[in-house]
Image (tube, rainbow, N blue to C red):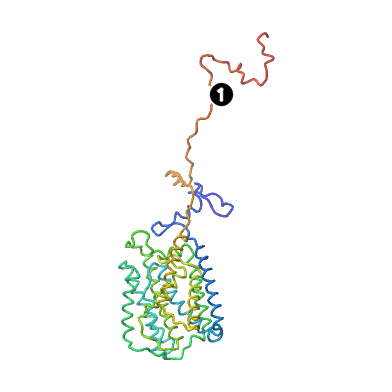
Amino acid sequence: MGYDEPGRDGSIEPSSGVPAAVLENVFDDPSHGEPGRDRVGVHIGWEIVLLVGLAAVAWLLWREDPDVLRGSGLRTLLVDVVALGLLTLAAGLSLRTAAPNLAVGPVAVAAALHFAEQGDRGVADAVAPAAAVAAVAGLLLGLAVVVLHVPGWAASLAGAAGVVVYIEHRSAPVLVQGEYDPRRHAVYLFAGFAAVAVLGGLFGAIRAIRRLVGRSRPVADPSRRRGVVAAVVTTGALVCSTVLAMLAGVLIAANGTAPVAPTAGLDWTVLAIGVALLAGTSAYGRRGGIFGTLFAVGLVSAFLAYAQARGWSVSRWALGGAALGVGLLVTRLVERYGRPGPVIADAPEPVSDGAISSGWAMPRPRPVDNWPPALPTPSAESPVDPWRSPRWEDEPRRWDDDER
């Protein structure tokens, strides 16, 4: 197909008259979702709401206990934000690939117990084996999801049950060993988390990356396989999700002042997925915001600090359930107003094989309406000499009088 010169806006229009927007959508695979670019306006609007909520809760916290937002109190709060943020990133990443990882909570608790027991060996020696085990567990989980082609939530729930069995081997809380204090690097940890969250959102807003990450999102029969690329992306996301959950557990143990209790950890799963949905990540996969994770994690962490300052006892089950409820409403909002807008354009006319092979597209001849004749049709009964017809006379005759 031939192309014309670039237009005023720099876009090149095909010589067949097909608009550039239509040509761009030609290369979308309909089996991977709606053609076109997802709209991000709904995400920006919701993130403004989250930012306003974060500012309001931070102001209430400042009025209740200013020490929480300065000095050692602020450093402790920042580490709590990073721990919950890593767990939310783990849940959000698996949600974006349409394979939610419900084992993130138990993995975090298991990692916290391991670090509490092995922390005296040093941070590197304690974290490296846990990271290796988490990566292998995530790989096995991913293979189970893509080889059997089963829902991620079902396979990860089975994996969570296995992790809970490991946790139940501890009958009593474990006191954290070692002297590692993450509060000394609180600012750097928070900056790293914020950079990962925002950059991940920015890259996820790019059309090609968004469609690649959400390739496992079902668009027809959910039991149909989505291809090799979808399998690789889903497996990689589950590996990263499990490792992020392990790092979150290490920070939870190191930043705490009480011994690590051997609980099932599913309350952490509910809270993490609830915050991820609250941040604007769709429960169906693929769609998500840019700053939503950062704002949602900050909002929930500030609320927990405010509740503690007020002396309230807030259950993670209750907070996670509330976040899930609001997050499901956000999912409906995102799916309704975040899908690609309709492209209104005339359908291109089919081109013959000869035009395609030669690179030229010739327009088809269009039917011509019945034009009026150039001259009036003379009557057959009284033929008129064209040279004596009045239509050639613009004024009364003078020189061609009959008496001449």
Residue 316 or residue 30, whichever sits in front: 316
Name the spot of residue 63 as percent of width and height, x first. Answer: 56, 81
Q: Which residue is disc 1 drawn over? A: 375
Residue 357 or residue 20, whichever sits in front: 20
For the C terminus, the quadrant is top right
Name the spot of residue 15 as percent of width and height, x first. Answer: 51, 47
Tally of marks = 1
Picture quadrant of residue 382: top right
Up-down relation of residue 195 to residue 129 (above or below): above
Name which residue type carries label 1: Leu
Q: Provide the secondary structure element on which disc 1 rests.
A: loop
Up-down relation of residue 183 to residue 161 (above or below): below
Residue at image point 51% right, 16% down: 380
Q: Residue furthest top?
A: 403
Name the spot of residue 170 as percent of width and height, x first. Answer: 33, 87
Residue at image point 53% right, 85% down: 73
Residue at image point 49% right, 50% down: 344
Dot 1, crowdedness within 10 Å: few (<14), some or many (≥20)? few
Picture quadrant of residue 225: bottom left
| In the image: residue 378, left or right of residue 121 | right
Up-down relation of residue 326 to residue 59 (above or below): above
Residue 336 or residue 88, whichever sits in front: 336
| In the image: residue 128, left or right of residue 386 | left
Name the spot of residue 325 as percent of width and height, x first. Answer: 42, 70
Q: Residue furthest right?
A: 398
Up-down relation of residue 350 to residue 110 (above or below): above
